Image (cartoon, rainbow, N blue to C red):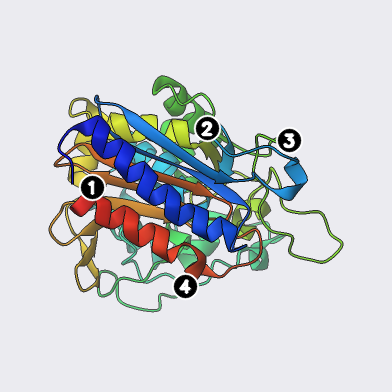
Amino acid sequence: MPTDPQEWARETAAALGAVLGEAVDGGRFPGGVLVAGQAGAGRAVAGRGLVAPECGDARPDEHTRYDLASLTKVLATWPLVGEAVRAGLLDPDAPLRAAFPRLPAPGADLTTAQLMSHTAGLLPHTGLARYEHTGRPLAEHLCAEPLVSAPGARHRYVDRGFVLLGLLLPDLLGRPLHELADRLWRGLGLTATAYGPLPRGPRLAPTEQRLGGAPRTWGVPHDPGAALLGGVAGHAGVFSTAADLARYAEHLLGGDGPLPAWFARSRRPLADVEPGLRRGLAWLVTADGAVAYHHGFTGTSLYLAPGTGRYVVLCTNAVYHGWDRSRLAPLRTLALRSLRA
């Protein structure tokens, strides 16, 4: 691989763009955009296909907004937890009851670190609709449910931990979740990042049409749990652009400041996911520590290589035709490989 940062970015974007183009030409999804770059040394952008048939001839670029799905976890909830930790309001290794004494067991005995590393033993299915119209706060419902495994015993990726954190953070930080996140993003210069709902238009990629004849999901979260919570949740609901995600990556990899320090702390492995892969606080981390990354179910990914300052951003609406995750496998595999070369 080239050592010159700009040459690396151009060659990586071109290689990834070719794979993205193959997926688009094969009809797997309408289009997408990606960014390859190195903090402080430039970036390259590659877009393929269309935003969506509903958007006419609009082509995706770094300013097209996409539903980030679970990238919300690392773009909203994870940095806000770091803010609470820095302020001394939350200890990641202390039981939740230390900060939230009204929460019921067994959830009150879990730690923030267990929630963020997906080792808390929470129920695997989000299923928030069952708690509607009960008159009891959702956070209490989530904590009162029985655990399916002992806390810390195993890694199981679930949304409930981040749903819970999204409900609790406003109590600690004194503002609604979307306001806390918006303040954070504006401070980082992420001007196109926001919770929905957002107005439909050619600069916003729609996702799935779940029922024939029904409107396509567009400007509201694809994730049903986030939609049930009005579009603002700790696990999903954020929309952003490849340009904003690249700016965020460059900030995390920039070296100084509280957020890069939180990123370094969060990369410490807390759980084994599979051979060669670990989980820190929210982030997946390769066993050699070379790359930290996270995916979004809708077809988004963010890959960061702390040792080199390089990163890759992927934004697609891969769920446009349904939930087949294999549509993105070649692209995601190459993105990870490009940062480990």
Q: Earlier in the sequence, mark 3 or mark 2?
A: 2
Q: Circle 2 sits in a helix, a strand or a loop, which is it?
A: loop
Three-letter residue code for mark 4: Pro
Is 328 left or right of 4, judged from the image as shown? right
Q: Which mark is residue 266?
A: 1
Question: Which residue, given by chain and number where applicable, does mark 4 sit on?
Answer: 124
Q: Nearer the viewer, residue 56 or 253?
A: 56
In the rendered structure, which amino acid carries the disc numbered 1? Ser
Residue 90 seen by the camera = yes
Which label belongs to residue 201? 3
Q: Nearer the viewer, mark 3 or mark 1?
A: 3
Q: Quadrant of residue 86?
A: top left
Instruction: Return the mark for residue 149.
Output: none
Identified at 22% across, 63% down, the residue is 278
Q: Which dot, 2 or 1, sits closer to the camera?
A: 2
Residue drawn 22% across and 28% down? Answer: 254
Q: Is residue 328 above or below residue 306?
A: below
- Amino acid at circle 3: Gly
In space, the residues marked 4 and 3 are separated at their CA atoms by 35 Å
Q: Secondary structure at mark 1?
A: helix
Q: Crowdedness of circle 4 by 10 Å Cα count: few (<14), some, many (20+)?
A: some
Task: Look at the image and tell me whether residue 86 can be seen.
Answer: no
The CA distance from mark 1 to mark 4 is 23 Å
Quarter of the rendering containing residue 43: top left
> Which mark sits nearer the N-terminus, 3 or 1?
3
Image location (x, y in percent) of residue 331: 41, 58
